Each structure stands twice: as C-alpha cells, then as structure tokens.
Amino acid sequence: MIGHDTFRRVDRWLGVPACAALTLLRRAYRFVRPSTASVGTAAPKHVLFVQLAESGSMVLADPALRALGAWTGARTCCVTFARNVGSLAITATLSGENVFLIRTGSAAELVRDACRFLVWVRRREIDAIVDGELFTRLTAVLCVLTGVRRRVGFHRFDGAGLYRGDLYSHPVAFDPGRHMAQNYLRLVDALLPPAVDAAPAPPETAEAPRIEPRNVSPAELYAVRGKLAARVGSLSSARLVLVNANASEMLPQRRWPPAHFAALIRDVLAEFGDVHVLLIGADEDAATTAAIAADVGDARCADVAGLFTLAELPALFSLSALLVSNDSGPAHFAAVSVLPVIALFGPETPSLFRPLGNAAVISAGLPCSPCVNAGNQRRTRCKDNQCMKRITVAQVFAAARAVLLAGGASRPPGFIDGRGAGAEA
C-alpha cells in the first residue's frame, strides 16, 4: 500500500513540474488556436467529481454531489481511491456503476488504474469535471489528461493554497473562511450556465449544509442487532455509546490519548448504569481499541473494531445514543443520522471540517492550532499534539453527560475550547 507521505512527495516533486509544463502547453495552444478556448455555456450532461483521499471528505462533498444533479440534471459520476469505496455506501448518493476506483496497493497498480480511468472517462462521455481535491497537483494533471474541456477546481490566485498551474477552465478561489461543504458547492456553482434560474446560490451564511438523512431498513437493523448479539450479547434494554478512538495515518496528531478515552468511558459507565460502550473502528484499529477495552476492564465496554462494514454504520448509528470521536471518518459518517456527535479537534480547524450532522466540537483552543491547512498539504512537524492532549476528560464527559441526561437526542453544546468559550454551530 502506497503511504500518504509517499503521495505527498510524488505530488510535490512530480506534480509541480507537470503542472508547470501543462500550463505552458495549454497557454500556447490557446494562443495558436484561440477559437478553441471556449468551453461552451450549455448545462453539462455527464459530470465527474474527483475526490480521492479521505473517506470523511466524501460525506462533506455529498451536498455538492446532490446539487450537481439537482441544479444541472446531469448524471453524476465519481473517481476515488478504492480504499474509500465503503464511504460511498454511507450516503448512498452514487450507484456503483458511476464510480471509478483507483487502487493504491503499488505504484504499478496505481498507474494501470489511472490509464484505465482515462479510457473510462471517454466511454462515459464525461463533459465536465469537478476536482474536489484541495490543491493536489496530480489530480489537476489527471483532469487535463482526460481531454475534458470543462474543468472546475480550486485555484490559489493570490490567496491560500499550493501551486498547481493554470489547468482549469473554471478556476475557483478556495475560501478558508467557509466550511468545506460550502467550498464544494461553490465548485458546482461555477459549472452552471448564467441563465439557469433554478440553481440557488451557494449559502453565504456560516451555517454549513446538511446531509440527506439515510432511511435504514428493518433488514439493516436486524443484521446489526444480530452481529451485536453474537459479539456482546443482548443489548435490547441498553443505551449504546459509540467511541471512535482512531484517526487515519494521514494525520495521527488528531488522536486523543487512549488513556483519556479509557478514563472517559469509566466515568460514563459509573454515572449511567444503562449504558454500554462500543469501541468502533476498522480491522487495523483493533490494537488501539483492544488496549482501551482492557484498560477500562468493564463488561459493559466492548471492543467491536472490524465487526461492522461502513455500509452498516447508519444502522448502528440509528440504534445508538451518542458518538464520541476524534476528528476522523465516523464523526462525519454520522451526519446521515440524528445521532449526537462529540468531535475532538486539534490540528485541523472545525470552521472548515466540522461534521455536518448533529455535532459539537471540543478543542483545547491553543494558539498553535490549527497547524495543517490547504497551504502545507495537511502536513505538520508537530511531534507532541498538545492540542489534543489538553482536551480534558472532564470537558468531554460534561458534554457527553448533557446528551445522555437528555436521553441522547439533544444537541450537545456547539463549541467548547480550552478557555471555556462556547458557541452554537
């Protein structure tokens, strides 16, 4: 599996010269053939959305994916890394035949799939591309190589972002003051012909758009209940609190210390006798969840990492009272339900990436945070994530307690930082 750091290095050392060379070629072609510069103003019929990297970003992009179809009537397709395919099942916005998956098991596999993708674009008659990646150079290059003339993507102009040439027919300035879901909507808006009356303007308020709630079928609920019963026994009379103590290897600094999670779980179990805690995660998270469960040492705390597929999470969310999570995929996946979420933020800013659902964020409010942004490829040199370590167990327990005392259906406080300030989302 190609690691995130390898992608960053390749994107920098190969992507920068590739973007520069293609920019020169594009400008030369427009100079020689100015009559071909226009890409037309008709509404697109087949639009491709590019979102490769993080699974949580697929949820943040979902309002834009839905807007593509609603505003233009176009068939929406998507290209993403194969490891993110499960996240598409969370929102169920796109059907499988409209999704192209690029594998990242090896460099050879990646190159083969990229070549297959270029053929797939032509067969699908894609006539517009929306590049949702934040200044990833290689996606800009890939979009040009498709031959699709109408291309929308983030451009730094004189603002925030990394250099990736002049490769878009419709460049859009990235706005770090708006939520990512709103930035994605601005990309979609750039595709619309000027005369389209039915297309609402992207919202100018600070409130981010909401995710379309998922309808969970009785069969899905039955399957999830059956898995729970087989692993931890009957929980029909219990309230379930989900805990996600994991975060992707792309940014491990987002992790709250496991000892803090264990202390939080012990406090919750001591206060609420009807609560069972489930430590959720993927198979690769099992070492972390097992260690926390062992530290807690209570039969009402169960490690279920790897038990549920991503497609089963909406049903699990509908059966639960609360989710406490690092800033990672599950916090965003829960947006398809009414499940209250407490998301812990440190190296990234919630003003851009807070979950879209019934969520509160807690931050230590340190002056060095956030330390990752669109201008540094979401990298940080920090080796001691005090922004997460200084979020206290007492802070998180107070927010969780408020939700559980209200029956698990209320909205937790909007924002809590290390100075005690709070504000509704």
Image: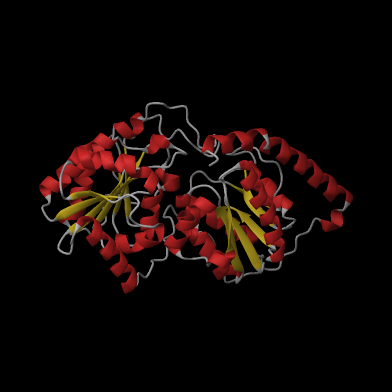
Name the image quarter holding residue 149: bottom right
Name above or below for residue 55 compared with residue 255. below
Pick the residue in front: 6 or 171.
Answer: 6
How far from the left and from the top, in percent, is residue 363? 32, 39
Number of numbered discs present?
0
How far across and down, in percent of the image, does residue 50 sit?
59, 54
The answer to whether residue 309 is left or right of residue 266 is: right
Give the left or right position of residue 351, taking residue 319 as reference. right
Q: Nearer the viewer, residue 191 or 221?
A: 221
Write down the quadrant of residue 128 in the picture.
bottom right
Between 401 and 85, the one nearer to me in the picture: 85
Q: Name which residue lies at 18% across and 49% down.
A: 401
Place of residue 311 in the rendered image (x, y in percent of width and height, measured from the top left): 40, 61
Residue 420 is at least partly visible in this image: no
- The residue under the point 63% across, 50% down is 153
Q: Is residue 225 left or right of residue 151?
A: left
Q: Answer above or below: position of 62 versus 287.
A: below
Q: Does the image show residue 15?
A: yes
- Is 349 or 261 nearer to us in this picture? 261
Residue at the limit of the structure toward the front, as seen here:
230
**Residue 36, position as x, y percentages in the image:** 83, 57
Q: Is residue 404 left or right of residue 248?
A: left
Q: Of all residues shown, which one is farthest toward the right?
A: 32
**What colouring does the structure picture have?**
secondary structure
Q: Residue at x 64, y 52 (%)?
A: 113
